[in-house]
Structure formats: structure tokens, C-alpha cells
Image: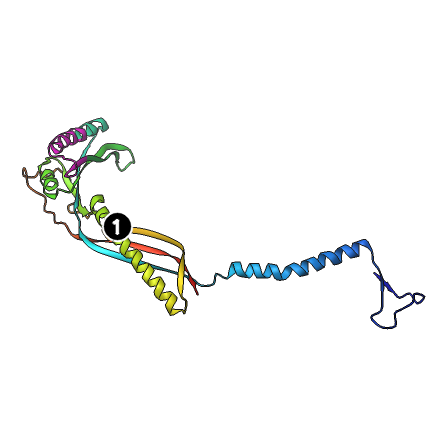
Amino acid sequence: MTLAIDPRRPQPAAGPCFLSVRMGRRTASLLATLAAALLALPVARTARAAEMAPDGLVQFSTTASTEVTQDLLAITLQVVRDGPDAALVQAQLKTVLDAALAEARKAAAPGAMEVRTGNFALYPRYAKDNRINGWQGQAELVLQGRDSQRVAQTAGRLIGMNIISAGHSVSRELAEQHESEITALAIRKYRSKATEVAKQFGFGGYVVREISVQAGDSGGMPRPVMMQARAPMAMAADAPVPVEAGKTTLSVTVSGTVRLMP
């Protein structure tokens, strides 16, 4: 860029000097680009700051719960057989399972007790030289329902099968009876806490940004009550399995983010 003053050109008596500026096209383009970038820089910084600084956002959760008596009993029975021939072992398992199914179905009733088969498996048995010298198989039958006495008494009548697990849980029907009430309580607690948080921080109120609602219970898997014996253990006819329902806690958790407002 070349800067020059023309002495032959008359100059005004007062005021700034007039300069004649000569520059190449490339220099002018670079200066224009630089000026545009400098003007845009404050705007970009402001937008980025607003995006990275979520002012007034608070995240927390609340939980409401109630204790209920478990109303669903599940009993799993199993038969185990072994022998030198796989087909023979499978046939023996099927015979016992078919007889147990026929007996259990006599007491089945919708809601009160349902009957279904469980795991049916056949495994090879190996000798010390890693050759197959026999087969072992197992078959399961599951009784489940809200009529605990019916389920327990039916399990006691199934000759040739052993109980490997029994446990109580909460049925879907019972859970749904309490779900609406617990959910409403959890939401009220969340709104109350949001109002209190806004007040403690000196804000006038809040708006919800995002929210989630999750339900659950404290019950676990059915606990084992008797391990499988090597040979079938016959039970006395109509002998009820000793079971007693426990309690569990149904809960609903509301979690989310709110923006505190002036």
C-alpha cells in the first residue's frame, strides 16, 4: 500500500488533511475480510456464551412410595433324569412332565392359577477320557397365581417333581391400583420442592424444562426353598407347600430439570 500527499492540490484552510490512498485489490480484500471478522466476533462470543451458560437451571428428583402385601405366588417344580441313551432320558422327562401338567391343569383358573412349562434341557455326561458315557436331562413346570392356597396345594399333589423355588411378587393388577395415586403424590412433591428451591435462591417461580416418571418396587426374585434332590421326592397328596406372603414397597420417582424464573 502506498500513501502520498499531492502538494499541487489546494488544501482547505482548516480541517483534516485529505490523503490519497493507493492500494492493490488483494490488500483491499484482506482488509474488508478482517473488518467483517472483527465486527462479527462480539456477536459470536455473545451467542456462544448464552448457549454454554444455562442460567437458573436446577436438576433434582422426588419419590413417593407405599407398602403393599405381595399377592402373586410362583412355584417352580423340576424333574431330573439320567441314563445311557439320550432318547430314553428325554422320554422319561416327557412322561413325568405330561402327568404333572394333566394334574395341574385340573386346578388351573384364570387369575387364580396359571400353569406353564419352564426349562427343558438335555446334556451329555462325560467320562474321564472326555467321551460321552451318558445323558442327563431336566424339565420344569411353573405354577403361578394370586390364589396362594390353590397354587401351594397343587404343587403338593404333583408326584415325581421337586420344588426348586417359590416366591411372592406383586401382580400387575395390584400395581396398577396404586400407580396413579403414587404418581400423583410424587408429582406434587416435585412441584412443591421446585417452588421451595426457587424461593431459597431468591427467584419468584420456575418452569419445567424436562421431566421423567419411573415406577418400581423393592421386591426381588423368588427365593429358593429347596434344592433339587438326586432322586424324585414324593409328597403326600394335597400337602400344601408352606408359603407366606411378605410386603414390598411400590415407588414412583419423578426427576427432571427446571429453570428458575424472576
Picture residue at 52% right of the left edge, 60% below the top: 52
Question: Can residue 131 be seen in the rendering of this structure?
Answer: yes
Q: Position of residue 64 (x, y in %)?
A: 26, 57
Quadrant of the image occupied by residue 79: top left
Image quarter of residue 13? bottom right
Query: Which residue, given by chain and number where applicable, does mark 1 sit on?
Result: 180
**Is residue 138 at least partly visible in the picture?**
no
Residue 62 position by quadrant: bottom left
Q: Is residue 84 magenta?
A: no
Tell me the magenta residue range.
93-115
Q: Is residue 4 left or right of residue 66?
A: right
Q: Is residue 84 above or below residue 181?
A: above
The image shows residue 235, relative to residue 207, as above or below, that is above
Pick the quarter of the image with the C terminus: bottom left
With 15 as the anchor, is 101 left or right in this view?
A: left
Q: Quadrant of the N terminus?
A: bottom right
Q: x and y percent of residue 70 in the render?
A: 17, 49
- Pick the residue in front: 15 or 133: 15
Q: Is residue 57 rendered to the left or right of residue 40?
A: left
